Amino acid sequence: MDTPRKQSIKPNTSISASTGENEEVNLVRQLGIFSYTVLIVGTAIGSGIFISPKGVLEYTHTVGLSMVVWILCGVLSTFGALSYGELGTTFSKSGGDFIYLLESFGPMTAFLRVWTCLVAVITGSYAVLGITSATYILTPFYPDCPVPDLAVRFLAAAIVCAIFFVNCVSVPLSSHLNVLFTFVKVAGLVVIVVAGIVLLIQGNTENFENAFQGDGDFKWIELPLSFYSGLFAYAGWEITASMTEELIKPSRTIPVSTLIAMTIVSFVFIMANVAYFTVLTPAEIMASDAVALSFGQKVFGNSGWILSVVVAFSCIGAMNGGVLSTSRMNYAASREGQLPKLVSMIHINYKTPMPSAVIMLPISIILLVGDSVYSLINYLSFTRWLFAALTVASVPYFRWKYPDWERPFKVNLLIPIIFASFTLFVVLVSLVSAPKDCGIGLLIMLAGIPVYLIGVCWKNKPMWFEEGIDKFNAFGQKLMLVVESEKKED
């Protein structure tokens, strides 16, 4: 690991630039405990809880073991979120795991994290969320036939563009929309949970009898793959420390919001699965592409289309929260010289890092057009948890290397050790269980190394190249009305 640069941990620093009118352009601290809790909940609850139960059951083969996996995934995700919370209160910069990887494992590892996110992990997820939300919005209008693919793609593109636009022009508006989307998706899950509990009380317990007896096809080596599906549903907690510079009293907001949000998400996810298994048999869950819709059709009949709208809102809300947080990682990467300078500039009126969001939009739209987005995300999924494990592993490293650092919030060291160890184990087993997919993903990740060497490490670039980059930055500044930060870190 590289020695961290102490300027990254200066408390309560802000990046600003003068507009020439005695007004500074900076990232404004405007998110409190409620707003940030809703942001975490809204990002964590995406499409996964409505789809992933099938993936968990596929590798566990029993209702009982599936429930154990869902509970453990909730515990692990909470451990990971709390570990990120300590890092977020230790480092004063926004950027989340990019900053932590930069300070612990060095600039190349941090760049590969940004590279994989831009190539597919994050941009591809926006494309998938757009397609999923568009499909569920249009499904009620095509009750007797498949939804036209062209209509799905056009609506998905419109949704993606709208979410990016909102995040470019207003953090408060994005936050308010996130509250709305989160309310709708949580309300939908509460309906599922209440309906399931009522039916369970009425005696629908058949699927829980002999809960650990399956079809005999269970293989221990495949069990970690079930955690991939479960962790995918919980994913989103990584944003817990990505917006440090925009939080009101981050030393309090981050840990409190993290604990509240992960408690809500874990409870709702576990109870939703209890409801699913109360209504649907394991065979019905395995035959369904959208478990929540199958649940709705069986319980609510013709009114089940309401859950289709809930799934659509859930996907849009997850995308909104993802763009809001991930753009700060791009912003931080540019500020550290790993992306073009334009990406770290701030809009003079909206006070948002507009270019850091805009850079993801064309990639998301391109991935939206083709069908390869699903394959890319599948290939690169293991890198998401690899980087999460490395990030959390930096908690005990920093404790050992720099014991005197101020840490407003500290977790028990067993928490990051358990999370990092288990997640690395899952990643290693997936390399054995799915060597082709993980191998392709590994090659895509490693393809970022020459990009890093040429774009970041190569300092004596030709004059024509430097002039081209300068023209690009100047054009982007004029187009988006953004300015470079004037106040620099010491």
Image (cartoon, rainbow, N blue to C red):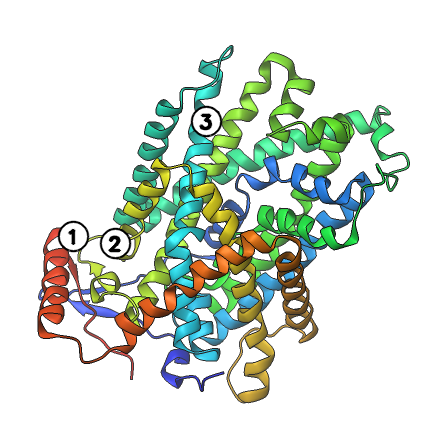
The image shows residue 358 at horizontal and vertical percentages of 26, 50
Locate residue 20: give its quadrant. Answer: bottom left
Q: Residues within 10 Å of mark 1 (few under 14, many from 20)?
A: some
Who is closer to the viewer here, 382 or 8? 382
Residue under the image location 90 percent in, 37 percent down: 210
Q: Residue furthest top?
A: 144
Q: Which mark is residue 480?
A: 1
CA gap, disc 2 and disc 1: 8 Å
Locate residue 365: give its quadrant. Answer: top left
The image shows residue 214 at horizontal and vertical percentages of 84, 38
Q: Residues within 10 Å of mark 2 (few under 14, many from 20)?
A: many
Who is closer to the viewer here, 92 or 67? 67
Residue under the image location 61 percent in, 40 percent down: 49
> Could you say whether the residue bearing mark 2 is in a helix, strand or loop?
helix
Query: Which of pointers 1 and 3 lies earlier in the amino acid sequence?
Result: 3
Where is mark 3, residue-wise?
A: 135
Mark 1 vs mark 3, foreground winner is 3
Who is closer to the viewer here, 300 or 149? 149
Labels 3 and 2 touching (C-beta < 8 A): no
The image shows residue 155 at horizontal and vertical percentages of 35, 28
Q: Residue furthest right?
A: 210
Labels 2 and 1 touching (C-beta < 8 A): yes
Who is closer to the viewer here, 440 or 472? 440
Amino acid on which disc 2 is placed: Met
Q: Is residue 232 above or below residue 3?
A: above
Quadrant assignment for the C terminus: bottom left
Where is mark 2, residue-wise?
A: 354
Residue 390 visible in rendering: yes
> Could you say whether the residue bearing mark 1 is in a helix, strand or loop?
helix
User: In the visual, does 262 lie left or right of 124?
Assistant: right
Query: Which of pointers 2 and 1 lies earlier in the amino acid sequence?
Result: 2
